[in-house]
């Protein structure tokens, strides 16, 4: 993602780290207009917790969280817990999005998971521009020819934001 937005010199740096560092230094005006919002700030896969996941989270919870994370095409799940996880994720994202109402911004949900939860959160604002169908930047999706129009739209949005803040 960084490579596509800021060139090959940033190819090895995750966008989140670039944004975090720039928030401290304010050295790169192109990063000043970017904020990242995750659907969930808690990792949903057990592997993110290393070899010793928290004992307070039972293995079957991890199985349900991973199932919800990897089955983003579903709107209803088979178990109550999976539906509760989805409801919590939706409410959590809705609360985050509501804080941005009446602010001019470009919302770019990257990947099917983010797109699903933005849709379920159902928060809309006339001040927002939404760029749809942007793939998640993992697995080199942004290099694929079929996504070049979306990547170009994201690039233009980043440049526009930087221009407005100068």
Image: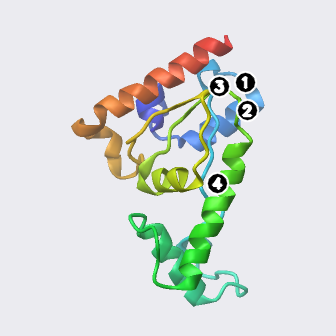
Which of the two discs, 4 and 3, labels the residue nearer the N terminus?
4
Q: Is residue 154 above or below residue 120?
A: above
- The residue singled out by tag 1 in the image is 26
Q: Where on the picture, by quarter, is residue 57? A: bottom right
Q: Which residue is mark 2?
A: 23
**Secondary structure state at the residue bearing disc 2:** helix
Q: Crowdedness of circle 1 by 10 Å Cα count: few (<14), some, many (20+)?
A: few
Front in this rendered view, residue 90 or 24: 90
On the image, numbered disc 4 is attached to which residue?
A: 93
Kindly report the distance in space between the C-alpha atoms of the residues bearing marks 2 and 1. Answer: 6 Å
Please name the residue shown 33% across and 46% down the image: 141
> What SS does tag 3 mark?
loop
| Number of numbered tags placed on the structure image | 4
Quadrant containing the N terminus in the rendered view? top left
Residue 35, percent from left and from top: 64, 36
Please report contact status of discs 4 and 3: CB closer than 8 Å, yes or no.
Answer: no
User: Comparing marks 3 and 2, which lies closer to the viewer?
Assistant: 3
In the rendered image, residue 115, in percent from the top left (x then y), is placed at 46, 50
Whole-number angstrom distance, CA of label 3 to CA of label 2: 19 Å
Q: Quadrant of the C terminus?
A: top right
Task: Confirm whether residue 162 shows in the render.
Answer: yes
Q: Residue furthest left?
A: 145
Q: CA distance from mark 4 to mark 3?
A: 18 Å
Give the residue drawn at x 62%, y 34%: 125
């Amino acid at each position: 993602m960084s490579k596509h937005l800021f060139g090959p010199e940033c190819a090895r740096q995750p966008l989140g780290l670039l944004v975090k560092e720039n928030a401290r230094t304010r050295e790169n005006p192109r990063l000043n207009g970017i904020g990242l919002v995750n659907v969930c700030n808690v990792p949903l896969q057990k592997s993110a917790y290393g070899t010793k996941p928290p004992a307070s989270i039972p293995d079957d919870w991890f199985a349900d969280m991973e199932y919800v994370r990897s089955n983003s095409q579903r709107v209803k799940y088979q178990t109550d817990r999976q539906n509760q996880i989805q409801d919590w994720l939706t409410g959590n994202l809705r609360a985050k999005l509501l804080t941005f109402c009446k602010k001019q911004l470009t919302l770019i949900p990257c990947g099917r998971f983010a797109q699903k939860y933005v849709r379920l959160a159902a928060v809309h604002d006339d001040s927002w521009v939404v760029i749809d169908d942007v793939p998640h930047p993992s697995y080199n999706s942004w290099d694929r020819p079929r996504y070049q129009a979306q990547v170009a739209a994201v690039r233009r949005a980043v440049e526009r934001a930087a221009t407005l803040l100068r």
